[in-house]
């Protein structure tokens, strides 16, 4: 089985790649990692030195001739587009067409929570890709993550005692740990059939930035974390991922998103994450325990004890959540991530 990961050197896709390598450690699938340039290959090699040279392929969504070689012999696609690009829909559609031409068996699109929020350019544009995918005739799964917890650099907040805030700190907002997103994506990519035609809303925890500051304050042992307002025009420069500051579209999309976060926020429901992973979604508290290396209450056992059997069970028996093939695999994901807790992205 060959799995293609697009934007492979990007932030989200690296979490997905990491999760696949952990979960399928015993018999990893063939991986094709689409990057935009040699720089992407260098970045991935530095982080994953065991990946074979044959894994990498340089291509551009907007250069049609580069896509057939990317798709050759690919069974399953994971696609995550770049942030705040006016061409995001065209990129997704070009990739879906290339997947259809190549006879891909399953296409996983990483979208966003509530693409139906049409006032938000970066949500609305994903709705176009979702619609095209649903109508494509391909087998598909759509993942709809809320705002990532990793947008906040908690180590920097701990160092400075300041939580930069570009919108109303009392607004309720949905957050998802990228580690949970990676785990769910791996779950779907390694066994896509039970997830065919699903659109999964993915939220870990709803809370305000004031509450996040409170959680970090507690994790720091009571040293108070202050909220500092970041002027809107400085937000693009300090974004967690590169955003083109000369793009009118990117600036407009960012402005609208911050206005929306300011007034409404985008909270959601975390039932789907709980159901898919067969455990509680990671919260700010669990993320801080892990990323700040605080004592973890979870019992960590020997790596060699975990075996993912071909029938989807593991050597520990897994735990049930009423879903036929998910529980055992999800156990492996959360335990394996816990054991490899030293990784950082
Ligand atoms: N941040 C959040 O809280 C959040 C929540 C939900 C959904 N999302 C969505 O997640 C996506 C961003 O993910 P991310 O943070 O992982 O972004 P990222 O780190 O910027 O990764 C995007 C990747 O796409 C590649 N790329 C850009 N243009 C390309 C092209 N024309 N052809 C081929 N590759 C290209 C980039 O390569 P180069 O850098 O080499 O160009 C980069 O590796 C956005 O669609 C955003 O809406 C974000």
Image (cartoon, helix red, strand yellow):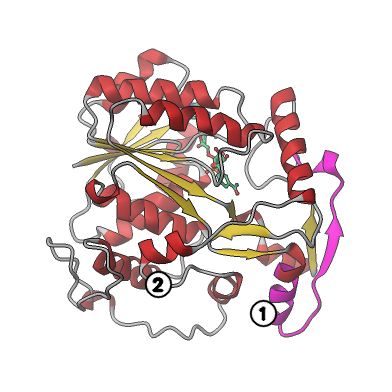
Q: Residue furthest left?
A: 310
Residue that badge 2 annotates: 279
**Callout 1–callout 2 Cβ contact below 8 Å:** no
Of discs 1 and 2, which sits in the foreground? 2
Give percent across and percent down for residue 316.
21, 79
Q: Residue at coordinates 34% horizontally, 65% vertically from top-left?
A: 333
> Which of the two labelled residues, at mark 1 and mark 2, occupies the earlier sequence position?
1
In the picture, measured across the screen, residue 241 lies left or right of residue 341, that is right
Give percent across and percent down for residue 132.
42, 25
Q: Residue at coordinates 79% horizontally, 43% vertically from top-left?
A: 259
Q: Residue at coordinates 40% horizontally, 51% vertically from top-left?
A: 16
Please state the extent of the stretch shown in magenta in the rendering.
Answer: 212-236
Few, some or many C-alpha atoms within 10 Å of disc 2 (few <14, some 14-19, many ≥20)?
some
Image region (quadrant) for ligand 1: top right
Membership of 149 in magenta stretch = no
Residue that badge 1 annotates: 219
């Amino acid at each position: 089985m060959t799995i293609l990961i697009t934007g492979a050197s990007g932030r989200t896709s690296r979490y997905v790649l990491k999760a696949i390598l952990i979960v399928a450690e015993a018999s990893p699938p063939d991986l094709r990692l689409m990057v935009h340039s040699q720089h992407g290959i260098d970045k991935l090699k530095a982080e994953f030195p065991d990946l074979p040279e044959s894994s990498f392929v340089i291509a551009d969504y907007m250069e049609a001739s580069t896509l057939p070689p990317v798709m050759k012999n690919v069974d399953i696609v994971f696609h995550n587009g770049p942030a705040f690009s006016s061409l995001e829909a065209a990129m997704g559609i070009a990739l879906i067409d290339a997947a259809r031409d190549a006879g891909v068996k399953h296409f996983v699109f990483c979208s966003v929570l509530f693409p139906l929020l049409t006032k938000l350019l970066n949500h609305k544009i994903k709705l176009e890709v979702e619609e095209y995918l649903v109508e494509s005739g391909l087998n598909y799964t759509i993942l709809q993550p809320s705002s990532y917890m990793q947008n906040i650099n908690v180590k920097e907040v701990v160092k400075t005692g300041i939580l930069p805030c570009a919108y109303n700190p009392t607004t309720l907002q949905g957050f998802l740990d990228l580690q949970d997103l990676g785990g769910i994506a791996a779950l779907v990519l390694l066994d896509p059939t039970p997830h065919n035609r699903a659109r999964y809303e993915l939220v870990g925890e709803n809370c305000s930035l004031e509450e996040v500051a409170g959680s970090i304050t507690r994790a720091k042992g009571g040293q108070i974390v202050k909220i500092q307002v970041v002027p809107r025009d400085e937000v693009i420069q300090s974004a967690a991922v590169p955003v083109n500051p000369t793009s009118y579209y990117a600036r407009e999309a960012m402005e609208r998103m911050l206005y929306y976060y300011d007034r409404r926020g985008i909270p959601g429901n975390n039932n789907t994450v709980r159901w898919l992973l067969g455990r509680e979604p990671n919260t700010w508290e669990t993320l801080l325990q892990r990323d700040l290396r605080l004592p973890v209450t979870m019992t960590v056992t020997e790596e060699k004890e975990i075996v993912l059997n071909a029938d989807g069970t593991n050597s520990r028996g897994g735990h049930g959540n009423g879903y036929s093939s998910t529980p055992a695999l999800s156990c492996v994901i959360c335990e394996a991530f816990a054991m490899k807790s030293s990784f950082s992205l």
